[in-house]
Image (tube, grey):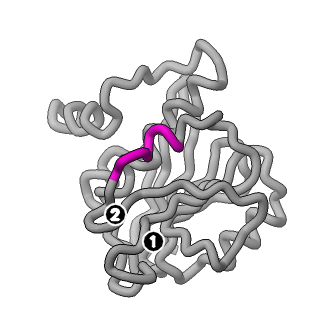
Amino acid sequence: MKRRGLLLALLLGLLPGSLKAAPSLEYAVKAAYLPKFIPFITWPDGAFAGADAPFTICLLGQDHFEGKLDQAAAGLRAGDHPVQVRHLAAPDPSANCQLIFLPAGSDPASARGTLDATRGRPVVTVTDSGLSVHGMISFVIENNHVRFDIDDAMAAEGGLAISSKLLGLAHAVKMRGQP
């Protein structure tokens, strides 16, 4: 149990977990989570346009993060790939996203279309709490704390491998081979 707590602290840094203050705190925590997921996920060969192509986090729709995601990703690298954040008004297959965040308030049909379009591809889909659809990683709010669920079966379809360390921190996990 101590190791799990230590890993969680490392994953989140020194972030406050309580969301009693304001919604902006919720998105500050989520902005910190997103880039920290990257080292715990392995993308297959060919997931990037080139050896030094950027690792792209795509944010669809409204930016609830108010720039905090851009700040959290600034200067980071995913192996040989510099991490960049792209803000997209609508899904764009040419954006070469390795991680897509679907925010609260997304149109359910559009969100479902994005999830269907990325299914079986090496793209981590992250859905915000409150959405009726769920990605590979889905944020949930429990007792005023940001948590996340993981659908490892969906990740396997895209050739992605999620570290057991990250799976161990998840609120709930749908394992590979489960219906």
Residue at (42, 79) in percent of width and height: 48
* Residue situated furthest left in the rendering: 3
State which region is magenta.
70-76
- For residue 161, side relative to residue 107 (left or right): left
- Residue type at mark 1? Ala
Rendered position, 47 above or below 59: below
Q: Quadrant of the N terminus?
A: top left
Residue at (66, 70) in percent of width and height: 115
- Quarter of the image holding residue 81? bottom left
State the residue position of label 1. 155
Of 135 and 81, nearer the camera is: 81
- Quarter of the image holding residue 72? top left
Badge 2, how many Cα within 10 Å: few under 14, some, many 20+?
some
Residue 75 is covered by the magenta coloring: yes
Q: Position of residue 71 (x, y in %)?
A: 48, 38
Residue at (51, 33) in percent of width and height: 146
Secondary structure state at the residue bearing disc 2 = strand
- Residue type at mark 2? Ile
Task: Tell me, for residue 41, which label it has, or none.
Answer: 2
